[in-house]
């Protein structure tokens, strides 16, 4: 028999260091020699049951020692492993056995008999096997099934050569050496358990198996991690968000890989113990934006960022991590600087502001759905160098496009007040404009509640729907599609219902969506997710357009910075609260709290009518009314003499 390359690597380490711990779990530890012996014994039993090269063998167990022994035993026979989740519905497991054409199963004492019966049906021919992955001649390592969110689960063959390439990548990226430990805690039907368990075994390390209780108790998980740090680990951003409040700033990992969902920059910085300076300095950036010309500032920032991204090409290992931090910090400054929003005030006539904001949000959500897929495709096809170059080209294109825009900017006001007074001017203006202040306050309270959605959604997918963590990615895409649709129609709704009416519609859609997400029915859950996505742009477009219309051009930076800082602070606190509460509250209670908070925000806008302030005209309004004059000098705002902090017409 010809063992696969991953198995050969393990057997090499078993000869080199037979007494070294290969796997450690609640029951104790197993050395490399003992693990090899147990795997050969299981292989002998499977062979006696008729397993031959190419046989597809169902493996129905949790992660840990039993799974590792079964996997190695199957590969010793050149057979193909088919991992199945014991907690999955019976019909799902039957379908997987039939589609993979499993003719054998690894026996486990606590199995309910569903898989064994399905295997007998396939062997006897009583049920025709579904069309599964084709036989490519060389036996695959294992068959992994998709979540089935778009239909029936589909089996995907993972070949031995590709598996070893992936294992070597993780081992090299993490810098693992013989004796290093790596955490194993993922469900065997997810895509990470194999690397979690085989990266250590193919590099001479040790698998540190988390107790099963960790899967549903983040506080216990954090305590276990701190008591015996595993070293290297893999976790999704949602899992990390749950753990962080209980880690209390302590480092539980030496190397960490996070994937499966988008990793927010704020979470990445929090994981590294870095305070997000760009976010905290938003008021300072707003002050800067109001004191300079915005278009040249944006061109220089995007151009500089394009050059800086290319420095990622110099990263070769952990010794160059500082380059990644510098690039991440610079990108944080770029996205935190409100220059894009403020330039729109000079660029767009007030009559176009609402529709422009609506289209911008729809476009942003569409790009947010497509860009991770496109980025992953480029990385897989061409590697990280191509991805860095593509990022630099994209930023360069943005700089060129902004540079090509013809806009007459309002001139920066002369500095006639102290730095501290200027820095706080955004908050003073917000407080002095009742409708703008009310809309902002409602949004801050709303985000202070809805921030728990990230944690609650993960629990709802796991506990309520019984789906793997990867389903969160499906949910995020559907919510993004709802947001793109909401962005497209929000401008029309604002023109019909006004600021308050549209905000209430948005809050109402989110509230109904939150209630539907408590359902255990996948269809209702996804409808609720869509409604949440559709409602969010309504309130976002209203607030963004209100700042655009009711704040002067040379206050836009500071007002936008004040609003963004308040929003981000509320959401960060809510995310932290959600992660802390999920260990003590049922996720359905969290959804109810979010629903009540959302409805309260809508009611707060309705209890006392506030008239809309007058629109503060922009340079673009003057151009639209008068038309461009030949050889016109750059426009400069003139003070109308209105009191500071009040809406004024110029």
Image: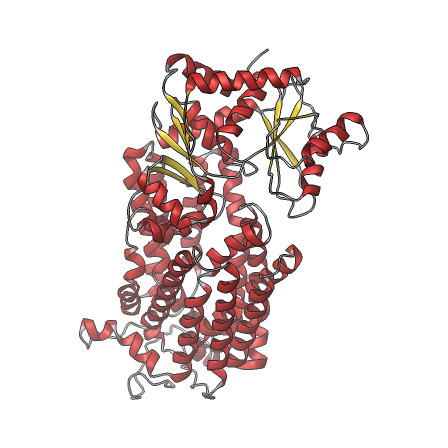
The quarter of the picture where residue 73 lies is: top right
Residue 574, placed above or below residue 103? below
Residue 52 shows in the view: no
The quarter of the picture where residue 120 lies is: top right
* Image quarter of the N terminus: top right
User: Residue 294: percent from the left, percent from the top?
Assistant: 34, 64
Residue 110 shows in the view: yes
Q: Residue furthest right?
A: 126
User: Residue 531: percent from the left, percent from the top?
Assistant: 59, 65
The quarter of the picture where residue 320 lies is: top left
So how many labels did they put on this image?
Answer: 0
Seen from the viewer's position, the closer of residues 548 and 162 is: 162
User: Residue 37: percent from the left, percent from the top?
Assistant: 49, 16
User: Residue 167: percent from the left, percent from the top?
Assistant: 46, 27
Residue at (48% x, 25% y) in the render? 165
Seen from the viewer's position, the closer of residues 459 and 349 is: 459
Seen from the viewer's position, the closer of residues 420 and 310 is: 420
Residue 294, placed above or below residue 612? above
| Left or right: where 53 falls relative to 258 | right
* Image quarter of the C terminus: bottom left
Seen from the viewer's position, the closer of residues 129 and 571 is: 129
Residue at (44% x, 48% y) in the render? 239
Q: Residue furthest left?
A: 418
The scheme the figure's colours follow is: secondary structure
| Left or right: where 237 falls relative to 4 | left
| Left or right: where 73 falls relative to 635 | right
């Amino acid at each position: 028999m010809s063992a696969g390359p991953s198995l050969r690597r393990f057997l090499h380490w078993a000869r080199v260091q037979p007494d070294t711990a290969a796997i450690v779990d609640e029951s104790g530890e197993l050395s490399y020699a003992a693990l090899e012996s147990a795997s050969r014994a299981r292989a002998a039993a499977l062979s006696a049951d008729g397993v031959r090269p190419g046989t597809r063998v169902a493996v129905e167990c949790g992660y840990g020692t039993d799974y590792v022994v079964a996997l190695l035993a199957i590969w010793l026979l050149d057979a193909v492993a088919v991992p199945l989740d014991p907690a999955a519905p019976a019909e799902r497991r039957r379908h997987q056995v039939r589609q993979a054409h499993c003719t054998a199963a690894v026996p486990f004492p606590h199995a309910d008999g569903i898989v064994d019966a399905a295997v007998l049906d396939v062997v006897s021919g009583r049920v025709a096997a579904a069309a599964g992955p084709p036989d490519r001649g060389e036996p695959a390592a294992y068959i992994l099934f998709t979540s089935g969110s778009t239909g029936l689960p589909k089996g995907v063959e993972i070949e031995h050569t590709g598996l070893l390439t992936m294992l070597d990548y993780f081992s090299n990226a993490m810098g693992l050496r013989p004796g290093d430990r790596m955490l194993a805690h993922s469900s065997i039907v997810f895509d990470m358990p194999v690397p979690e368990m085989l990266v250590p075994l193919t590099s001479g390390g040790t698998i540190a198996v988390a107790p099963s209780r960790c899967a549903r108790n983040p506080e216990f998980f954090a305590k276990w991690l701190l008591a015996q740090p595993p070293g290297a680990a893999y976790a999704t951003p949602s899992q990390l968000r749950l753990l962080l409040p209980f880690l209390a700033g302590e480092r539980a990992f030496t190397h960490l890989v996070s994937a499966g969902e988008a990793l927010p920059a704020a979470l990445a910085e929090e994981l590294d113990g870095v305070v997000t300076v760009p976010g905290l300095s938003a008021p300072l950036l707003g002050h800067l934006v109001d004191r300079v010309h915005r278009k040249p500032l944006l061109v220089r920032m995007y151009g500089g960022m394009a050059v800086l991204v290319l420095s990622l090409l110099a990263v070769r290992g952990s010794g160059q991590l500082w380059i990644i931090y510098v690039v991440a910090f610079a990108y944080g400054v770029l996205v935190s600087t409100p220059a894009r929003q403020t330039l729109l005030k000079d660029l767009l006539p007030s009559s176009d502001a609402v529709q422009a904001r609506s289209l911008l949000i729809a476009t942003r959500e569409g790009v947010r759905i497509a860009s991770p897929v496109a980025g992953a495709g480029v990385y897989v096809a061409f590697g990280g160098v191509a991805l860095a170059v593509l990022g630099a080209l994209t930023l360069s294109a943005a700089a060129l496009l902004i540079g090509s825009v013809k806009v007459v900017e309002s001139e920066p006001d002369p500095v006639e007040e102290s730095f501290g007074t200027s820095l706080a001017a955004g908050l003073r203006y917000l407080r002095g404009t009742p409708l703008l202040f009310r809309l902002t306050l409602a949004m801050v309270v709303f985000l202070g509640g809805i921030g728990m959605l990230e944690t609650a959604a993960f629990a709802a997918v796991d506990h309520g729907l019984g789906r793997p963590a990867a389903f969160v990615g499906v949910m995020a895409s559907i919510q993004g599609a709802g947001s793109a649709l909401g962005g497209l129609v929000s401008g029309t709704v604002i023109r019909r219902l006004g600021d308050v009416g549209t905000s209430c519609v948005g809050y109402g859609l989110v509230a109904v969506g939150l209630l539907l997400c408590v359902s255990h029915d996948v269809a209702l859950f996804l409808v609720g997710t869509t409604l949440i996505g559709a409602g969010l742009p309504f309130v976002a477009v209203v607030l963004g357009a209100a700042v655009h219309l009711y704040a002067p051009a040379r206050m836009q930076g500071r007002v936008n910075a004040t609003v963004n800082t308040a929003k981000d602070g509320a959401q960060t606190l809510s995310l932290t609260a959600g992660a802390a509460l999920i260990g003590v509250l049922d996720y359905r209670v969290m959804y109810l709290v979010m629903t009540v908070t959302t409805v309260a925000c809508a009611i707060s806008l309705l209890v006392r009518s506030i008239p809309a302030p007058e629109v503060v005209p922009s340079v673009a309004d003057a151009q639209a009314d008068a038309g461009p004059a030949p050889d016109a000098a750059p426009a400069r705002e003139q003070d109308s003499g209105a009191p500071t902090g009040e809406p004024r017409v110029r």
